[in-house]
Image: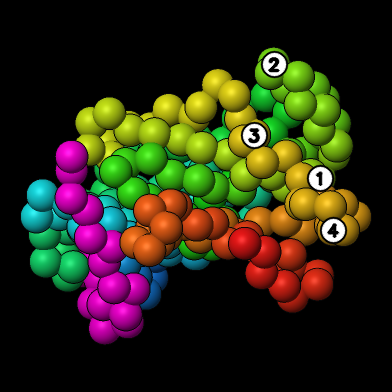
Amino acid sequence: MVAITTCVLTVLVGFGHLARAYYTEEYPSAIHISPEMNWMNDPNGLVYHDGKCHLFYQYHPNATTTWGFLSWGHAVSTDVVHWEHLPIALECSQSAESECTPNNYVKTTLFSTIYTSNYRTAHTEPGGAVIREGQQSQSIAYSNDDGLTWTQYEGNPVIESPPLGYEDQWNQFRDPYVFWHEQTSKSIMLAFLAMKQKLLI
């Protein structure tokens, strides 16, 4: 069993990637981490494993200033000051069917993760899930090589909609957070209903 400790997000406040020659901005960040190019958002999913801290973040691989086509950027560091950028961990679907969105709070344990899928069009998933345009559902991805490459679970989404009583929030259901509860020996997941400003367990 692989032991993984979640990195503390606050380390990013004062440390990050030092600017290098391939940065083309007039004023590239010299303290905080930034991608080599294009748009980033929401650094999340910090995981410490085998002497390296993995950082995942929302990333638009094709544009510098706009939100969209959200994929997972990925960087690793041994000192949380100098970062090496790796290939995109999870790329947004090339089809018009769904947009892979890590959203806030991607939590990774044993190199599996639950994240929010934000679907751009109405369709039926191969597993039979009927998806509405703009629906947000929870999905799973896993890595067999210590987080370097990721595979989306074929049975996604694993949680299609909010529970009874909150069905009308199907397009504002996101940001899963998973933790291990020692007393019950179970994984507990929290998910956010954005418009209701409520956490669900």
Q: Distance between the residues labelled 1 and 3?
A: 14 Å
Q: Distance between the residues labelled 2 and 4?
A: 25 Å
Whole-percent x, y for residue 26 in the image: 38, 70
Where disc 1 sits, the SS reads: loop
Which amino acid is tagged 2? Pro
Which amino acid is tagged 1? Gly
Which of the numbered marks, if any, corresponds to residue 111?
A: none
Placement of 89 over or under 57, stated as above or below: above
Which of the numbered marks, if any, corresponds to residue 157?
A: 3
Q: How far apart are marks 4 and 1 (CA)?
A: 16 Å
Whole-percent x, y for residue 95 in the image: 68, 24
Where disc 3 sits, the SS reads: loop
Q: How far apart are marks 3 and 4 (CA)?
A: 18 Å
Q: Main secondary structure of the magenta part?
A: loop
Q: What stretch is highlighted in magenta?
A: 1-24
The residue to which callout 1 is attached is 134
Give the residue drawn at x 66%, y 56%.
174
The residue to which callout 2 is attached is 126
Placement of 182 over or under 60, stated as above or below: below
Q: Do the residues labelled 1 and 3 touch (CB within 8 Å)?
A: no
Q: Which of marks 3 and 4 is in front?
A: 4
Give the residue drawn at x 61%, y 30%.
156
Q: Residues within 10 Å of mark 1 (few under 14, many from 20)?
A: some
